[in-house]
Image (spheres, rainbow, N blue to C red):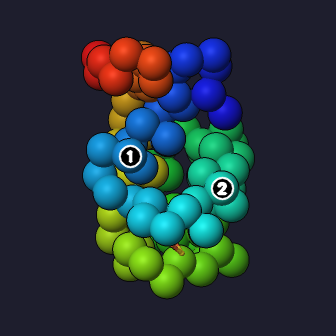
Amino acid sequence: MAQGSELHPLQQAFAELGAAQCGYCTPGILLTAEALLAENPAPGRDEIRAALAGNLCRCTGYTKILESVELAALRMATGSGGAAVESGRSR
Ligand code: FES
């Protein structure tokens, strides 16, 4: 998902909002959310919840995950997204 040293907006949002703890569920959730946003760039909370229903997270609860997908969608719509991994800079 990352492009070189640039995190995908979903990855960036998950990191910023604490949507990943152990990371066990994170790859599946990120890829599912990426597919959702490719089909529906501005999903509502219920649409995000339905899309992610097959992914279980035992660590974070789902509020941070849902908020992260919403934040990434907003950033993708406005063209402000990922951040440099190497430098730790954020845009
Ligand atoms: S972050 Fe640990 S299961 Fe989701």
Left or right relative to 69: residue 1: right
Mark 2 within 8 Å of ligand 1, using the beta carbon:
no
Left or right relative to 57: residue 69: left
Viewer-side residue, 9 vs 78: 9
Residue 27 is labelled as: 2
- Mark 1 lies on a secondary structure that is helix
Left or right relative to 82: residue 17: left
The kind of residue on which mark 2 rests is Pro
Task: Report crowding for label 1: few under 14, some 14 to 19, many 20 or more residues within 10 A (C-alpha).
Answer: some
**Residue in view at x 40 percent, y 22 percent:** 83
**Residue in view at x 41 percent, y 49 percent:** 14
Q: Is residue 76 visible?
A: no
- In which quadrant of the rendered view does residue 51 lie? bottom right
Residue 15 is labelled as: 1
Q: Is residue 56 visible?
A: yes
- Mark 2 lies on a secondary structure that is helix
**Residue in view at x 64 percent, y 44 percent:** 34
Residue at the farthest bottom position:
58
Image quadrant in which the C terminus is located: top left
**Residue in view at x 39 percent, y 60 percent:** 19
